[in-house]
């Protein structure tokens, strides 16, 4: 189950939604087969089963975000308990950070800003919880760093501004043609006082 869920996330990062859906269906099939055992002996739920369901929740939330631009509510995920959903949600923020980095390379400032806003909203909601030491607390701590990374990424993207190409016509790549390009692709004129 966990491998299939991880593969679904991998597929989503590569825009292969059909393959991701197949992997998520495989998780649901195995979970349905195990459900009678889990119901009969509740101690079997913790450990690897919970880890797999958290990974599944992460993949489902990520897929929903990519398709609809919003979070999948916990009520739409019958397989996951509240804590498993929460673990998947916190793990989702790491995938959203990776997605934002890819969008930043395409200069998609709006997508990076949306990702930062979603992580910021999750962070604000998580502040309402009294998290004790445990898995959720560790994931919350990593959420803080994810938010900081997204804020830094957005800041650097804003500083970089629109992508500008430069010409390198000289034999060593230097010279007047190496000046930043203005509108229409022409090099901006520089006075000696500007240098």
Image: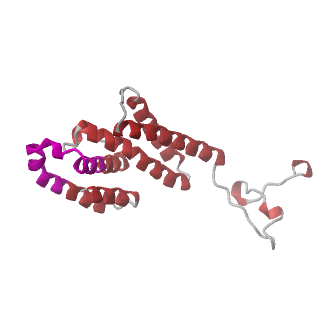
Which residue is farthest bottom? 171
| Residue located 46% across and 48% down the image | 97
For residue 10, above or below residue 171: above
- Would residue 139 be visible to someone looking at this image? yes
Q: Is residue 117 magenta?
A: no
| Residue located 26% across and 60% down the image | 23
| Residue located 41% across and 50% down the image | 95
Along the line of sight, the residue nearer the viewer: 186 or 115: 115
For residue 47, above or below residue 177: above
For residue 158, above or below residue 107: above
Asked where in the image residue 124 lies, by quadrant, the reply is top left
Q: Specify the segment rendered in magenta.
A: 28-57
Number of numbered discs overlaid on the protein picture: 0
Specify whether 183 is left or right of 125: right
- Would residue 17 be visible to someone looking at this image? no
Q: Is residue 40 magenta?
A: yes
Q: Position of residue 84 (x, y in %)?
A: 27, 41
For the stretch drawn in magenta, the main secondary structure is helix
| Residue located 30% across and 50% down the image | 55
Q: Position of residue 136 (x, y in %)?
A: 35, 37
For the N terminus, which image quadrant?
Answer: bottom left
């Amino acid at each position: 189950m966990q491998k299939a869920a991880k593969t679904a996330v991998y597929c989503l990062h590569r825009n292969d939604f059909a393959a991701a859906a197949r992997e998520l269906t495989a998780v649901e099939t195995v979970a349905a087969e195990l459900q009678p055992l889990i119901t009969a002996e509740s101690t079997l739920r913790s450990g690897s089963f919970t880890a797999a369901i958290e990974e599944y929740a992460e993949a489902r939330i990520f897929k929903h975000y990519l398709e609809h631009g919003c979070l999948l509510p916990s009520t739409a995920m019958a397989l996951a308990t509240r804590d498993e959903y929460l673990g998947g949600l916190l793990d989702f923020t790491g995938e959203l950070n990776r997605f934002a980095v890819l969008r930043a390379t395409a200069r998609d400032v709006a997508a990076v800003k949306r990702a930062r806003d979603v992580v910021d909203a999750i962070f604000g909601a998580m502040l309402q919880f009294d998290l004790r030491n445990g898995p959720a607390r560790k994931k919350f701590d990593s959420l803080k760093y994810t938010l900081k990374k997204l804020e830094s990424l957005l800041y650097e993207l804003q500083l970089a501004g629109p992508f500008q190409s430069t010409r390198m016509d000289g034999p060593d790549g230097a010279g007047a043609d190496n000046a930043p390009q203005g509108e229409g692709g022409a090099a901006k004129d520089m006075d000696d006082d500007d240098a």
